[in-house]
Amino acid sequence: MSDGRNSLRDLFRIRLRGRWRPWAVAAFVLAGAMFATSALSSKGLDLRAASITDLNHVVRQERARSDDLQGRVAALNEEVGTLSRRVGGTEVTRLNRQVDRLKDPAGFAPVEGPGLTVVLQDAPKSEIDAAAEPGGVSQEELVVHQQDIQAVVNALWAGGAEAMTIQGQRVISTTGIKCVGNTVILHGVPYSPPYRISAIGDPSELQAALDDSDYIDAYLTFVDSYELGYEVIPSVSLEFPAYTGSTALKYARPDNAAATPAAR
């Protein structure tokens, strides 16, 4: 009889042990999921209410940061005020007035006044073709070159010209005239004859300066002999635009070789 009871007791223990194992595994899985969820939610921080005790420290840090930013804003406002006062100061006003006075002679302002215009033109085609025959002058002598334009410009400046244009472009201190083939390049733009050089100033003084130029006197010999174009047109009023091109400077190194004098 005792053996039968023992057998029943062992059977009950086996059944009870078989039922406990699944529940134990489920409980461990649930606990692990809860721990993982808590770790992800806290991102490594303490989720307990005790962390609220650091709130005063956080507030003090933010207040200090706010005070620092307000100090920087005040310093920048003061700097802006200082710069604004300088812009409106007497020194800046004086410099602006000086710039305004220099705009006219520098060519950066439009100008109007009496003056004259010199027109240079190549000789007629018949004269240029005749120059190709043996014994004639060179064809190069019967077309307008850079040095011819430059001679007129220099004479007009010497005659007191206040402002000048070539082909309608304002001439300034950095203006360069370059001859390429049968065209002249001015401020990067190629032009063909006739070339018009206009100057504002006293017309009689400008004319006298042209008459006193040795280079122009030599040029006029070709005008008389080969109909090279030369005309002077006085004007009661000329209007020149302000120069609006580039003001960048470019430098060149002079050649050591002696320059060959021009034929005219």
Image (cartoon, rainbow, N blue to C red):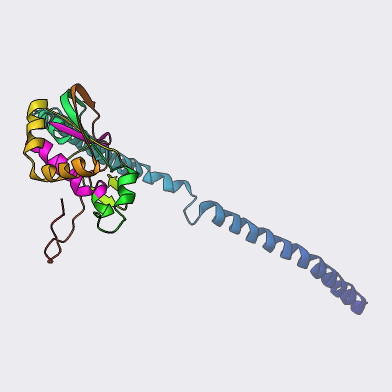
Q: Quadrant of residue 115?
A: top left
Residue 108 drawn in magenta = no
Residue 144 drawn in magenta = yes
Q: Quadrant of residue 212?
A: top left
Numbered-mark total:
0
Q: Residue at x 25, y 54 (%)?
A: 136
From what the image shows, is residue 18 above or below residue 219? below
Residue toward you, 220 or 24: 220
Query: Which percent across, then down, holds residue 59?
Result: 34, 40
Can the viewer see residue 182? Answer: no
Left/right of residue 94 with respect to residue 149 in the rendered view: left
Residue toward you, 35 or 224: 224
Query: Which percent across, then down, holds residue 200?
Result: 15, 28
The residue positioned farthest toward the top in the image shown: 236
Can the viewer see residue 156? Answer: yes
Residue toward you, 213 or 101: 213
From what the image shows, is residue 211 above or below residue 148? above
Q: Residue at x 32, y 53 (%)?
A: 181
The quarter of the picture where the N terminus appears is bottom right
Q: Residue at x 15, y 30 (%)?
A: 104
Query: Which percent across, then down, holds residue 64?
Result: 27, 41
User: What stretch of residues is rendered in magenta?
Assistant: 142-169
Query: Which percent across, then down, holds residue 146?
Result: 22, 48
Q: Quadrant of residue 16?
A: bottom right
The residue positioned farthest toward the bottom in the image shown: 3
Residue toward you, 60 or 125: 125
